[in-house]
Amino acid sequence: MSEKTEKKEKTEDSFGASESVIIASQRSLGQKIWNHRMVLGFVRYPPAFIASIIAIFFLFFAMFGTFVVSWDPNKPVLSETLDPPAYSLAFNDVHMLGTDTVGRDVFMRILMGGRVSILLGITGATGALTIGVFLGLIAGWKRGVVGATIMRWADLQIALPLLLMALTVAAVFGPGLHILLILFSLWFWGPYARISEGLTLSLKNREFVEAARSIGCSPTRIVFRHVLPHLFSPLLVLWSFSCAILIIIEASLSFLGVGIPPPTASWGSMLAEGRQYLHRAYWLAMFPGLAISLMVWSINTLGDRLRDVIDQRQYL
């Protein structure tokens, strides 16, 4: 038996744990989340790899589309109304996905609609995550009247559909990007609070929390230093699914005419316009609907894969 093997056995006998477990327990949160095994496990899963390409494509063109494609998404060209798709390597000279009823380039409008949808999805989900985690930690740690009040309000939010609330708010305040952004953040934190509260309750009496109390750590330090890192994995997965849900809700509101006001491009409003020309100009409805489907599928696939590769227990 080699000297290295004997040393490892001694370590296991002395401390009751393998050397790899001890080393892994000393890693920072970033080291546990990002390592080569996780990246390889993520890339080697074909659906996640394809979803990554689709998501990167939409993110890239949402940010830099105006620098790549020269067409103005809001400028009408009446001489080119309802032109069918044309394909060429010089994509700035042809309308690759055709034009709409007033001659605007459909490809460019899909890219700009993706900018709005992705912005609302990511920003709204991040705002809801911040509010929900903060209130969920308070409810799980404090309990009592404060915790019960927070969780009853979270239950009310979960019970009332966000789409119904969005329709009500839009009817009162009118459609607008800022209205939807505030609404998504303030009325979508219930699931985050519910998960944060449940996990906090299960962790607050664990040995490592009791050890932190015994050495005089303040409740704030215990919550943010020892409890919050354990919430990262499930909350990140929920955040990714929330982005997809908010993109669908924004598209639904715009389809009904109470979302993003024109002339700003939106996938939902483009789909609503295109349904009137399904027999004459199929591309008006097909390509925006395909963009919604691909983006939502890619986000859901990435979120499902993240649940497997970010779970810290797989690497301890």
Image (tube, rainbow, N blue to C red):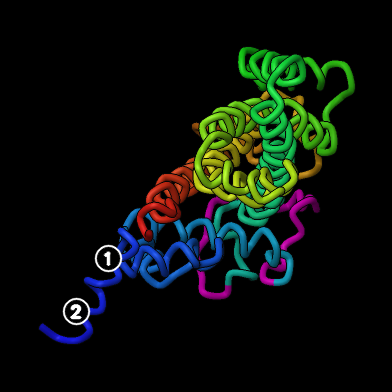
> Image height check: is 28 above or below 227?
below
Which residue is identified by label 2? Answer: 5
From the viewer's side, name the closer residue of 3 and 60.
3
Q: Position of residue 196 (x, y in %)?
A: 60, 34
Please name the amino acid that badge 1 sits on.
Glu
Total tally of numbered discs in the picture: 2
How far across and down, in percent of the image, does residue 281 sit?
54, 40
The chief SS type of the magenta part is loop
Position of 129 with respect to 198 (left or right) is: right
Residue shown at 84% from the left, 32% from the top:
179
Report if residue 150 is visible in the image.
yes
Q: Which residue is mark 1?
A: 12
Residue situated in front as seen by the camera: 284 or 267: 267
Q: Is residue 143 magenta?
A: no
Residue 135 position, x and y percent, is 73, 31
250 relative to 42 in the view: left or right: right
* Residue span colored magenta: 68-90
- Hey, what amino acid is under mark 2? Thr
Between the C-alphas of marks 1 and 2, the distance is 11 Å
Density class for disc 1 (Cα within 10 Å; few <14, some 14-19, many ≥20) is some
**Residue farthest to the right, as pictured:** 173
Horizontal side of residue 21 vs 94, given as left or right? left
Q: Quadrant of the N terminus?
A: bottom left
Q: Is residue 45 above or below residue 233?
A: below
Q: Is residue 89 magenta?
A: yes
